[in-house]
Image (tube, helix red, strand yellow):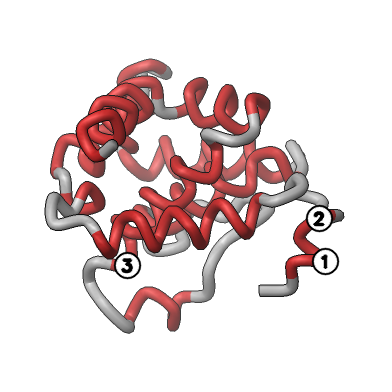
Amino acid sequence: MDLKKDLTSSRGAGTTFFHEHGHLIDFSNPKLVSVNQDFTTALIKQFMKSNSLKSKKEAYSRIGYELHDKGDITSSVSDIFGEFSKNKIIGGWRHEDSYWKHAPRLINAEVFAHFYEAQFDKDRLNVLKSYFPKSTQVFSNDLGGLL
């Protein structure tokens, strides 16, 4: 991690630092927040419900279109949706397909780190809340139990 670059990142100062710190908290905690099924299953379902969509394919198309041109503020949302759709949803940011083959737990761990990093940037947190209101609440509850 290049701390100097992180200070001037287009995603916001300190985003990478807080993201990686989120991994540290997640991996070192015996409660393993990142494997909380309520946290992970709510993502696509919530978007489908709030937008009255009937199929995942329809949701993937709509989400990708929305995120494509919204800029760096949606990098976490873009990556999360990419993770859960096996990169069928492609916004402005994502990990390559090969990244997800390393460990089955990586998807949940990345989601945890994205939600953690957003705790330090009000605008990023508001973007996550707008797409994942239930998951944001679950994360907040779980994080409160870790402190």
Instruction: Identify the amino acid type marked 3.
Output: Leu
What whole-number distance in Å separates the C-alpha atoms at marks 3 and 1? 26 Å
Q: Residues within 10 Å of mark 3 (few under 14, many from 20)?
A: some
Q: Using the image, tell me which numbered label, if any, was put on residue 7.
A: 2
Instruction: Identify the amino acid type marked 1.
Output: Lys
Residue at 45% across, 41% down: 115
Left or right: 15 as drawn, with respect to 31: right
The quarter holding residue 103 reads: bottom left
Residue at 65% across, 51% down: 15
Above or below residue 19? Residue 45 is: above
In contact (CB < 8 Å): disc 2 and disc 3: no
Give the SS element for disc 1.
helix
What whole-number distance in Å separates the C-alpha atoms at marks 2 and 3? 26 Å
Above or below residue 127? Residue 84 is: below
Instruction: Identify the amino acid type marked 2.
Output: Leu
Residue 78: percent from left, percent from top: 56, 48
User: Which tag, 3 or 1, sits closer to the chain's start?
Assistant: 1
- Where is mark 3, residue-wise? 106
In contact (CB < 8 Å): disc 2 and disc 1: yes
What whole-number distance in Å separates the C-alpha atoms at marks 2 and 1? 5 Å
Residue 88: percent from left, percent from top: 46, 58
- Where is mark 1, residue-wise? 4
User: Which tag, 2 or 3, sits closer to the chain's start?
Assistant: 2
